[in-house]
Image: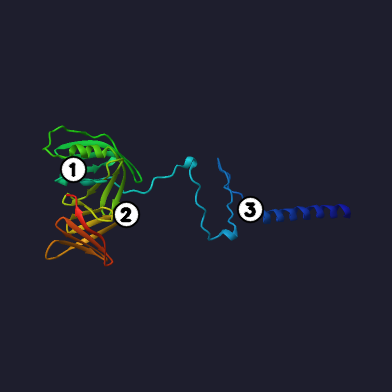
Amino acid sequence: MPASKARTGLFIMSALISASLIAACTSPALPPAQPGYIPKPIEITRPDTIGQTSPPAPAPIGGARPSAPGPSLNASSWYWLGTIGGAEFVAPADPGSFNLEFLDGGQLAAQVDCNRGSSSWQQDGSTLRIGSLASTRMACPPGSEAARFVRQLGKVRSAALVRGLLELSTEDAGTMVFARDPEWRLSNYDCPGASPMRVAVGRGQAVVRLRTDAWVLTQQSVGSGQRYAEGNAILIIRGPDANLIVDGKQIAGPCSTRR
């Protein structure tokens, strides 16, 4: 073989070896061939954004926003203590005769004084809707609040759990208040120079609601009247009057009950 041809062959072989080495260093290994394989895009995080909080997601188109969180009512049972709305206050003589059971599958069972009823319920966060109530038609004793109770249920728009009590806000009938235990009783007090004060008492405790504040107080032994206290709050009830003291200052009272 002439010397020139030998040198040409060596040059071509060296070039092929160099190209193979360069390709091996710069090209990543390909994934095995699979049917339907689609490579995922590579996500790159800028160094100057590491550790920063992600911006909030944009609001849904049209201004719609998810409902606010609400209580979980599924598989729960509640007794009606009364309804407070404006200057009106209504409470049943026996809360045990007015009961709501929120069953699975959106079914509602109700005790409406001397009658039994059923309906549907739908909840989305704090938003609550109760369907038309179908019930038996026994004649309840005079003075029954059954008709008012059914009418108010149809106007319920939202639900909230406040210190263990369930509050159902209605369209125009005020707020329906429920407890897990039928032994509880509800009173509403008018206070001079302040908003009305709502007090639910039962099982040695009192739940006090004044404007947007609420307290759970424990009953204490006293010579006369009733005294409930916890932390910096004290509730004193004597007959139809009540006083609420917080941080040593009377913030409501003397208040007089509406019933």
Q: Nearer the viewer, mark 3 or mark 1?
A: 1
State left or right for residue 255 relative to residue 142: right
Quarter where residue 221 is shown: bottom left
Amino acid type of disc 2?
Thr
Callout 2 touching callout 3 (CB < 8 Å): no
Dot placed on the residue nearer the N-terminal end, 2 or 3: 3
Mark 1 = which residue?
Answer: 98
- The residue at 21%/50% (across/down) is 180
Whole-angstrom CA distance, mark 3 to mark 1, is 72 Å
**Amino acid on which disc 1 is placed:** Phe
- Which residue is labeled 2 in the image? 212
Residue 133 visible within the image: yes
Horizontal arrangement in the rendering, residue 208 relative to residue 139 (left or right): right
Residue 145 is situated, as x and y percent measured from the top left of the image, at 17, 40
Q: Which mark is residue 28?
A: 3
Most foreground residue, 77 or 9 = 77
Q: Nearer the viewer, mark 2 or mark 3?
A: 2
Task: Compare marks 1 and 2 and give the one earlier in the sequence.
Answer: 1
Q: Position of residue 170 (x, y in %)?
A: 29, 42
Q: Mark 3: which secondary structure? A: loop
The circle on residue 53 is none
